[in-house]
Image (tube, grey):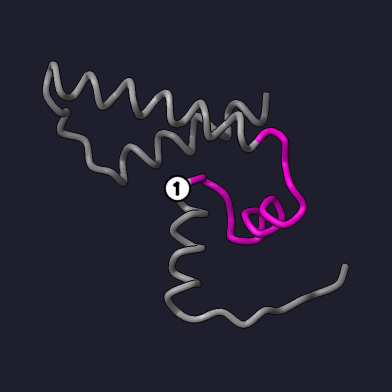
């Protein structure tokens, strides 16, 4: 295994870390997928977009639940891990 390094600004690093957190992957996994490609990523992003649209419509009609964004992301990561282990 070889090691590579790149220079990024603090702002760029923060954006990359945020994107990795949103996808529920490590920074390394994000960079590998972005550089080497992954056919499943587009499908997963489409599923996430559909889920978020569904939740947005529900919150407009019924009202928002009292869960924090952190709790929502934790649950989404748990569900993602369960699906990837199956």
- Viewed as shown, does residue 66 lie left or right of 18? left
Q: Secondary structure at mark 1?
A: helix
In the displayed structure, would residue 36 be above or below residue 3?
above
Our reading of the magenta stretch's main secondary structure is: helix
Q: Position of residue 6 (x, y in %)?
A: 67, 79
- Viewed as shown, does residue 58 lie left or right of 28? left
Is 82 within the magenta? no
Q: Position of residue 18 (x, y in %)?
A: 44, 58
| Residue beneath the point at 80% across and 75% down | 3
Residue 83 sits in quarter: top right
Foreground residue among 63 and 86:
63
| Residue beneath the point at 65% across and 60% down | 28
Q: Position of residue 46 (x, y in %)?
A: 52, 29
- Taking the view exactly as shown, the residue that stands out farthest to the right is 1
Residue 57 sits in quarter: top left
Foreground residue among 74 and 5:
5
Q: Which residue is mark 1?
A: 22
| Residue beneath the point at 52% across and 54% down | 20
| Residue beneath the point at 46% across and 31% down | 48
Is 29 within the magenta? yes
The residue range painted magenta reads 23-40
Q: Residues within 10 Å of mark 1 (few under 14, many from 20)?
A: few
- Viewed as shown, does residue 10 lie left or right of 43? left
Q: Position of residue 63 (x, y in %)?
A: 11, 23
Q: Quadrant of the C terminus?
A: top right
Q: Quadrant of the N terminus?
A: bottom right
User: Number of marks in the image?
Assistant: 1
């Amino acid at each position: 295994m070889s090691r590579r390094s790149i220079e990024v600004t603090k702002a760029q690093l923060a954006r990359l870390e945020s994107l990795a957190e949103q996808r529920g992957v490590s920074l390394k996994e994000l960079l590998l997928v972005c550089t080497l490609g992954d056919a499943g990523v587009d499908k997963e992003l489409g599923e996430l977009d559909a889920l978020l649209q569904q939740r947005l419509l529900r919150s407009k009609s019924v009202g928002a639940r009292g869960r924090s964004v952190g709790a929502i992301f934790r649950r989404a990561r748990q569900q993602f891990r369960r699906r990837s282990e199956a």
